[in-house]
Image (spheres, rainbow, N blue to C red):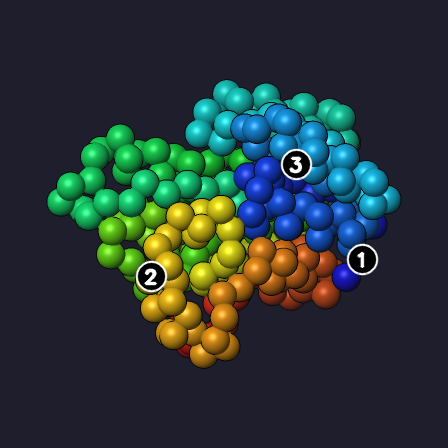
Amino acid sequence: MNLAGRVALVTGASQGIGHACAKALARAGATVAVAARNQSKLDELVAEITAAGGRAAAFAMDVSDEDRVKSAIKQAIAQLGKVDILVNNAGITRDQLVMRMKRADWDAVLNTNLTSAYLCAQQVIPSMLKQRWGRIISISSVFGQMGQAGQANYAASKAGLIGLTMAMARELASRNITCNAVAPGFIETEMTAALSEEFKQTAVKQIPLGRVGKPEDVASAVCFLAAEEASYITGHVLNVNGGLLMG
């Protein structure tokens, strides 16, 4: 999976899955534009990628702010020349039962997890159309496929990413731009670290492979979908969940 000459933009790259995706794409040869709110963590990531012989640049971006999204991606394209690969990874949780969920928490999760993917795609598609090559990869979730009590906003946002992915896949296929989603199950990240130990143990019992996943497991799937080897795959949801959900 050689991505030499490609430029990838990864949102939510300061930690977790996004951090792993940025490093994996760089190892595959891509120049990586890493985006998130935390500038210091982005700078550390760029230094890490550069020290390993890769190429990367940091762009501070709050994906819930449309103007910041537009300006950051415009800056990235101006500096790096193009964007070939977009990884929509930025995401948050604001868990609560539907009957108690505040509208602000619903809006925050939908804006960060779903609307941001639309905004980012809209900004990079012209670059991809120009070169008639592109990869848009969105990080969904197993809970976007099967739901989860207490996470109606999160599940809705991740299910929405799947619908968005399929719609864009149909719109852009004729221009050699593929659009796919990766749906992780339980992955060891800062987000899942907040879950109770009892919840984690119960979750592991439901996973046929008997373990939680690592961010690198998701990053490997993203690299495959970004590569030429996946050129005939579009509108697909690739499950990385240890067998938690099959079919």
Q: Which residue is mark 1?
A: 2
Q: CA distance from mark 1 to mark 2?
A: 39 Å
Query: What's the amino acid at mark 1?
Result: Asn
Q: Can residue 228 be seen?
A: yes
- Taking 87 as reference, is 181 above or below it? below
Q: Do callouts 3 and 2 mark residues in contact (Cβ within 8 Å)?
A: no
Identify the residue at horizontal 43%, vertical 52% (top origin): 192
Residue at 76% x, 26% y is: 79
- Residue 172: % across, % down: 57, 50
Residue ID at (54%, 36%): 120
Image quarter hosting the C terminus: bottom left
Q: Is residue 1 above or below residue 12?
A: below
The residue labelled by disc 3 is: 34
Instruction: Decide which of 110, 162 is in the foreground and name it.
Output: 110
Amino acid under disc 3:
Val
Residue 67 vertical placement versus 181 (above, below): above
Which residue position holds label 2? 199
Q: Is residue 133 visible?
A: no
Q: Depth-wise, is mark 1 or mark 3 nearer the camera?
A: 3
Question: Local crowd at mark 2 within 10 Å, few (<14), some, or many (≥20)?
Answer: few
Give, as a three-letter code, the residue at label 2: Phe
In the rendered image, residue 71, in percent from the top left (x then y), is placed at 59, 21
Indicate left or right for 23 with 91 as reference.
right
